[in-house]
Amino acid sequence: MSYALPPAGLPSQSDKLTGTSIFTEAYAFMPAGVMRDIVTSFIPHWQGSRAWIIARPLSGFAETFSQYIMEVAPGGGSDQPESNPEAEAVLFVVEGQVELRNSAGKHTLDEGGYAYLPAGEGWTLHNRTDKKATFHWVRKRYEPADGIAAPEAFVTSDAAVAPIAMPDTNGAWATTRFVEPTDLRHDMHVNIVTFQPGGLIPFEETHVMEHGLYVIEGTAEYLLNRDWVSVGPGDFMWLRAFCPQACRATGDGPFRYLLYKDVNRHAKLPW
Ligand SMILES: NC(=O)N[C@H](N)C(=O)O
């Protein structure tokens, strides 16, 4: 499996714009071409590391998650990666190898490696190799549910989990589910969605859940609200609640993306 990366660097002065970004009230589209050195951030208590912050709540508490692409140089990492004890995390490695330590011990995550870290979990992450490592870090303030225990940490990988075909699609559309949909301890899902060539979301999905979609492989036409956008490896889409969405895979190979979704909790009331 292959996983797209930010191009970093800067386009040459003779290049025209490398991709068209879109920002609307319903969604944002950030093509891979805009993920360059000068738009990275440094994060407190991380050494030899930088982040593309590709999603964050914009309007108070109306949105639920943030997402970073973290690049960690050889020898870099953090003994204090998360300062918010209410923040749960999913890590998904797209390049190289990282060493994760948590209450269960030491884990080596290679490309396609996946970790769920519940709120309050102590963890550290380091790149002990001589090549850079890159991973996605999805953060959400965990919302406990009365009488339901908090989830436990786990480590797995893209290759270890079999994708499940969506009903009536002959496998043209499948989801790699890292958490059972009926496991109500979890209030977010970070899954991988795969379309075979020509596969479709054949209706305008419109729902209260938000999304972050990072294209890890392949190409498609993606419907975002009223706009059909051509998407490819390394592109990111941020969808607010109720943003209509559909897609049509356009390439010769699979079209795959990492998908964040908030799930399994009451809709918030203003009182
Ligand atoms: N855009 C998407 O892939 N949406 C998913 N079908 C979902 O909401 O689960």
Image: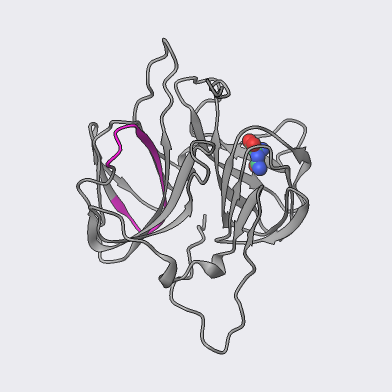
Give the percent coordinates (x, y) of residue 253. Answer: 67, 58
Read off the magenta span: 83-98
Query: Is residue 109 at all visible to an observer of this figure?
Result: yes
Left-right relation of 117 to 160: left
Residue 46: quarter of image: bottom left
Query: Is residue 128 at all visible to an observer of this figure?
Result: no
Give the percent coordinates (x, y) of residue 62. Answer: 54, 36
Q: Residue at x 52, y 25 (%)?
A: 180
Is residue 198 inside the magenta stretch?
no
Left-right relation of 107 to 33: left
Q: Residue at x 43, y 76 (%)?
A: 9
Give the percent coordinates (x, y) of residue 173. Answer: 69, 41
Q: Residue at x 62, y 64 (%)?
A: 21
Viewer-nearest residue: 66 or 7 = 66
Q: Residue at x 72, y 36 (%)?
A: 206
Is residue 92 inside the magenta stretch?
yes
Residue 128: quarter of image: bottom left
Left-right relation of 209 to 80: right
Q: Characterize the magenta stretch by its predominant secondary structure.
A: strand
